[in-house]
Image (cartoon, rainbow, N blue to C red):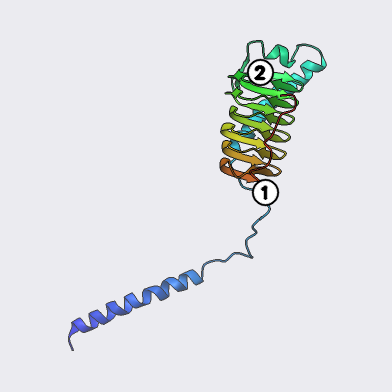
């Protein structure tokens, strides 16, 4: 019998045995002691920028509270907004205000605005350095804002542009014709259909409201 036949038969047998050998090796691999645990209640989202900002702002807020309690410096909105901003290596130029603050219509602020209290923005304001408030934030219509962070709720007026993100520990309400890159909340996010939001994450969910709903109005604006 031709020796070539035996060579071909041996090669064929070797190739045919490869899947069985690999399967056996896979079968003999160590297995997990039990089912893998997956926490479905854990919320995964990209909030790094907001969390970093909150950490960096903490020392400034603590200093502001101490300053106010000891009457070391006037941190009222009227005075702080008229003076030159302060500088911090991690925050850049910023303005620290103690007390509820109202920013009049068509005001432009280039620096980071930190408010210990509630913050209200009038219509057509430009907050180019972003804003952080320990209280509620209410934004008028047709504003341009770099970012917003609040330890409470955020209400966004119609036709407002937020270039980067909004982050709140409370709920976020977005009026019609707004454009926002990213919105994150520890509570719930409500928005009308006629707005543009690229990324959304909320612990209690995201709701679409009736676009015919009356636009948000600021008290006293």
Q: Secondary structure at mark 1?
A: loop
Q: Residue at x 75, y 12 (%)?
A: 74
Q: Position of residue 205 (x, y in %)?
A: 67, 49
Q: Position of residue 99 (x, y in %)?
A: 77, 21
Q: Earlier in the sequence, mark 1 or mark 2?
A: 2
Q: Secondary structure at mark 2?
A: strand
For disc 2, the neighbor class at 10 Å (few under 14, some 14 to 19, many from 20) is many
Cα gap from disc 1 to disc 2, whole angstroms: 33 Å
Residue 178 higher or lower than 65, as above or below: below
**Picture quarter with the N terminus:** bottom left
Q: Position of residue 111 (x, y in %)?
A: 60, 19
Find disc 1 in the rendering and name its residue.
205
* Residue 179: assigned label: none
Residue occupying the far left of the picture: 2
Find disc 2 in the rendering and name its residue.
95
Q: Nearer the viewer, residue 38 or 101?
A: 101
Q: Which dot, 1 or 2, sits closer to the camera? A: 1
Q: Position of residue 101 (x, y in %)?
A: 73, 21
Q: Quadrant of residue 198?
A: top right
């Amino acid at each position: 019998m031709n020796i070539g036949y035996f060579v071909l038969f041996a090669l064929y047998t070797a190739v045919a045995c490869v899947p069985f050998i690999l399967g056996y090796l896979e079968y003999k691999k160590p297995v997990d002691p039990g089912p893998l645990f997956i926490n479905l209640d854990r919320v995964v989202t990209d909030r790094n920028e907001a969390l970093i900002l909150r950490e960096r702002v903490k020392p400034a807020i603590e200093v502001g509270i101490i300053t106010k309690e000891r009457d070391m410096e006037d941190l009222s909105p009227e005075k702080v907004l008229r003076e030159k901003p302060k500088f911090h290596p991690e925050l850049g130029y910023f303005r620290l205000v103690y007390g509820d603050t109202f920013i009049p219509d068509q005001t432009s602020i280039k620096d980071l605005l930190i408010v210990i209290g509630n913050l209200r923005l009038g219509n057509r304001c430009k907050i180019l350095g972003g804003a952080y408030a320990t209280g509620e934030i209410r934004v008028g219509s047709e504003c341009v804002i770099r970012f917003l962070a609040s330890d409470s709720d955020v209400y966004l007026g119609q036709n407002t542009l937020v270039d980067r993100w909004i982050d709140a520990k409370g709920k976020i309400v977005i009026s019609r014709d707004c454009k926002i890159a990213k919105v994150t909340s520890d509570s719930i996010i409500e928005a009308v259909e006629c707005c543009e939001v690229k990324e959304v994450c909320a612990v209690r969910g995201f709701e679409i409201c009736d676009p015919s709903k009356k636009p948000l109005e600021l008290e006293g604006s």
